[in-house]
Amino acid sequence: MIETKHIMISGILEEMISENHPFKIRLNDQEFSYYTRFYNYPTMMKDIHDGKHLLIDPIDPPIGNIKIIQSNKVTLESFTSSYLVKASVQFLSRQERNVIKLSYPKALDIEKQKRTEIRVPIDPSWGVIVKVIYPAGMSFLGPVINLSKNGICFVCQTPIANIDKLPSMKLM
């Protein structure tokens, strides 16, 4: 769902800030991700409500603080208590203490989520595979797509009959 109403955008941003989740940054649609948090300052919520700009802490890994200056497109991705939120913004300037000033998003791409922790994408070239073994001896392999503190996303590339009726499974 794409949200373009300012009142909704500011409300979701305020929720992201109050929950203080770190968020992922992608530069120019590259696969590599950087991480940061919103910079906390006295008038932050007013600036968000007024749609002025976003301020973020320095980026990790630090090379992102240099690369963001040359980026045409900056994509922010974070979780609220129940949504994955993505926003496209522009780099505006670097402030004191390496705080980064970004444009205010014109729209948010919102997806309902079950996991609230940051998902770390796993590059397919790393060859990370999960083996799932059911008590009855049935098993399958699946490449890992992403993982977080509370979950893992992987793909089973072959159909499995009645998987929802099997008791429990063990990940290896």
Image: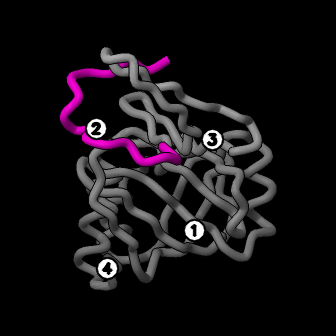
What residue is shown at x 31% (from left), y 73% (from top)?
Answer: 9
Tag 3: Cα neighbours inside 10 Å, few (<14), some, or many (≥20)?
some
Query: Gap in Å between the C-alphas at discs 3 and 2?
Result: 25 Å
- Estimate the x, y position of residue 49 in percent, counting from the top left: 29, 71
- Which residue does the numbered mark 2 point to in the structure image? 163
Q: Which amino acid does label 4 sit on?
A: Glu
* Disc ID at residue 5: none
Q: Name the residue under label 4.
A: 3
Kindly identify the residue that appears in the image at 58 percent across and 39 percent down.
Answer: 143
Residue in view at x 19 percent, y 34 percent: 165
* Marks 3 and 4 in Cβ contact (< 8 Å): no
Disc 4 vs disc 2: which is toward the camera? 2
Q: Where is residue 66 in the image (x, y as percent from the top left)?
A: 80, 55
> Label 3 near label 1: C-beta < 8 Å?
no
CA distance separating discs 3 and 4: 29 Å
Residue shown at the point (47%, 69%) measured from the top left: 87
Q: Position of residue 43 (x, y in %)?
A: 36, 59
Left or right: 128 as drawn, with respect to 139: right
- Residue type at mark 1: give it: Leu
Which region is colored magenta?
Answer: 156-172
The vertical placement of 137 against 26, above or below, is above
The numbered mark, 4 or 2, whose residue comes first in the sequence reads 4
Residue bearing the label numbered 3: 122
- Give the amino acid at mark 3: Ile
Residue carrying label 1: 102
In this view, the mark in front (1 or 3): 3
Circle 4 SS class: strand
**Do the CB atoms of the residues marked 4 and 2 lie less than 8 Å apart?**
no
N-terminal label among 1 and 3: 1
